[in-house]
Structures are given as C-alpha cells and as structure tokens.
Image (cartoon, rainbow, N blue to C red):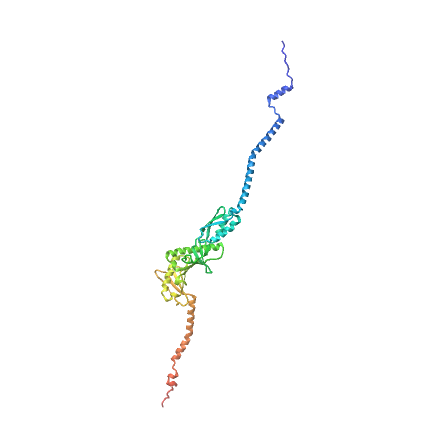
Amino acid sequence: MREQVIPQKVGNRSGMAAKRRAGGVGQRPQRRDREGMGQTLSSRIRSFANYVPFILKATLAIVIGGLIFAGYRAASAASFFQIRKVEIQGDYRASAADVQALIVREVAKTGVWRADLEEISTRLERLPWVRVAMVSRVLPNGIRVRLEERQPRAVVRTAAGRFLWVDEDAVLLGDMLPTDQMPVFFLRGWNEEPGDTIRKENMDRVKRFLELQREWTAAGLSERVSEVNVIDIRDVRAQLAGDDSKIEVRLGSQDFGKRLRDALSVLDTHRLTPRGQFISYVDLTQGRRAIVGFLSGAQAISDNAGSASGPSVGETKSPDAARPERNNQRAAANATPQNNSETKRKAKPSRDETNGGERPRRARPTQ
C-alpha cells in the first residue's frame, strides 16, 4: 500500500491567515473607533448629569439670597424700624439733649436696622464731656447709648476771663458752674490756639499743674496759692491768695515744694516790717537765694542776710520805686546852692543890727 503525501501549497491564504491568527491578536480599528465615540458621549452626558444638582442648588441659593436682600431692603426702609426711642446712660455732665438730637438726626436717614453704630459713636465722642460712647440697637425702633464721661482735673482761666474745666487729655470740657466744687487753685498760661502741637503743649501744662497740686496739697501749702502760671513749664510762677494776692512767687523749673515753702517763710518774715505791704514778688529761681521785689514807695534796701533755716535774701525794688528816689536826689542837689546862700545871708549882720541901722564910723587918730 503506497502512502500518499499531499504537498502544502506555498502562499496558501488560509495557512497564512491561520498563522496571523495564531501569532497575533486581530484588531478592527474602524469598529473600535465607533464604539469609543459612543462611550465618550455617554460618559459626558453622565458627567453633565452629575453637575445638574449642584447647578440647581447654586441657582436656588442665588434666588433665595436675592429675595432675602430685597426683603431686607424693604424691611429696613419700613416705618417699623424708624427711630422712636433713645436710651442714654451715664450722662452726668454731658448734655442729654445734644446726645439725643445727634442720634435722631443720624438714625433718621437709615432707620434703626441699617444705622451705622460706629459712625454714631465717633460723632458722640466729639461732644463736650464725652470720652467713650457705646451705641447698640434695641429693635425694632430704639437706640441705647452708654457714655463714659471725661473727668475734670483742673480749671483754666482763659485770656477772656472765663473759667473752664479741662481733663488730662487737654480737652476743654465746659464752664465752671456756681454749683461746682471750687478747685484748690487755678491754671493760667493756656494756649487757646488749635492744632495737635498746641494740644501736646497743653497736655504738658496740665501734667505739670497736677504734679504741683498733689505736692502742695500734701505739704499743706495749696491754700496759700490762688493760681499757677505754667505758660512756660520751665519757669513756673505761683500767684498767692488772700492778703498776698498781689504777690508772685517765681519758682523756676524744679524743687517746687521746697522753693514755695522757703518763699513763704521769707514773705512772712518781711510782713512783720513796715516794708511788707510793698512786696511785689519773691524770686527763688536761683535756688537758695531769694530776691524780694518791692513796689514804688518802699525804702531802698540792698543787703544779703543769711539764715540757717532759710535761703539767703536779697532785697530789691521795682523800677517804679527807683524813679522817685532819683527825683528826690535831683531835688536835693538843686536845693543845696539855695541853702548855702541862705546860710551866708543869715551869717552876715544887717544894718538894723549895727548902730540902729547906721554904718559904723572909723575913729580919727588924735594928735
């Protein structure tokens, strides 16, 4: 029996296709592209659908916000929130009428609901006596104000003669009333010009004044002082009170308590003399040397007397006192020649005093 061998044909397409199928994975690009496009579109639709609730929520929130804003505008402009009541607390010296008028004027523009409380507080703090103003709403139609007033620390005597209270911040508060407690002494030398630099200088004056007030009150000397001039805080001057109201004590820039005590001691010593009523000032700016000035009419003195308990004293006169002395010296000098002529005339005998008024004759010699 013969075996038959069937030869394999070269270039058999089926064989080549089998090999290709066995050696690699068949791909169909055109069909794959169509399927990919369909999946992308559907995924996009699904992604967009996921954002729909968020968009709806955002839109709903915007609509609700607009409605709330419109309602707020309508409610705030309604007469329901118009100012009808103002409560003021802490108005001991501040004018309640001024506070209420300012609040009503500001709140009437916007209503209680939309009132600018910070701006109202700032405006209230510009009023006299008001240091801090705390403003709050009392819905629906009220405003409450709590005031912290400034504390008066000194009374300033102005150039026009007015007496005004002032606080530590150099803020003029208002006139001193007859019912107010009288201060220990007054402050002079206040600069009434506007400006931050001037206010800083006035603050230094108030500070120096309060230091003097505490020191002299503790030493029991404040009752002898009427007012203190601090126009120059390096040259403090005190005007005395009572019977010594015309006397000024010049203290300089330091040791105010000791110098005032020494000046009063010197003054009390001179008060016992006839010249005491002519004292004009006591100058202790040099420290231990006290210079006493006199008004016109006092006797000229120039001596230095030391003491163990007090400063050395140098007494002088004011220019008005020196002028009468010069005039008296000139009058005495002019009167001297006249006095000499009168003395000579009186010393010479007259005719009436010799021989009945006849001139004496010479005796003739005898022969």
Q: Which residue in the rendered view is the most extreme toward the bottom?
A: 367
Q: Nearer the viewer, residue 278 or 258?
A: 278
Locate the C terminus and report the quarter of the image it occupies.
bottom left
Q: Nearer the viewer, residue 87 or 259?
A: 87
Residue 114 appears anywhere in the view: no
On screen, residue 347 versus residue 29, left or right, reads: left
Name of the residue lying farthest toward the left:
308
Residue 126 percent coordinates (x, y): 48, 52
Q: Nearest the camera: 128 or 242?
A: 128
Query: On screen, 90 above or below 265?
Result: above
Q: Position of residue 113 (x, y in %)?
A: 51, 46
Question: Who's the residue at 57% across and 33% down the image?
Answer: 49
Residue 71 shows up from this direction: yes
Is 282 above or below relative to 96?
Answer: below
> Which image quadrant is residue 317 in?
bottom left
In the rendered image, the vertical position of residue 235 relative to residue 367, given as above or below: above
Rendering coords of residue 157 (x, y %): 45, 59
Q: Is residue 336 left or right of residue 114?
A: left
Front-most of residues 217 and 298: 217
- Image quarter of the N terminus: top right
Name the residue located 55 percent from the left edge and 41 percent from the top edge. 67
Residue 345 image position (x, y, % from top left): 40, 79
Give residue 21's quadrant in the image.
top right
> How many numbered marks are there?
0
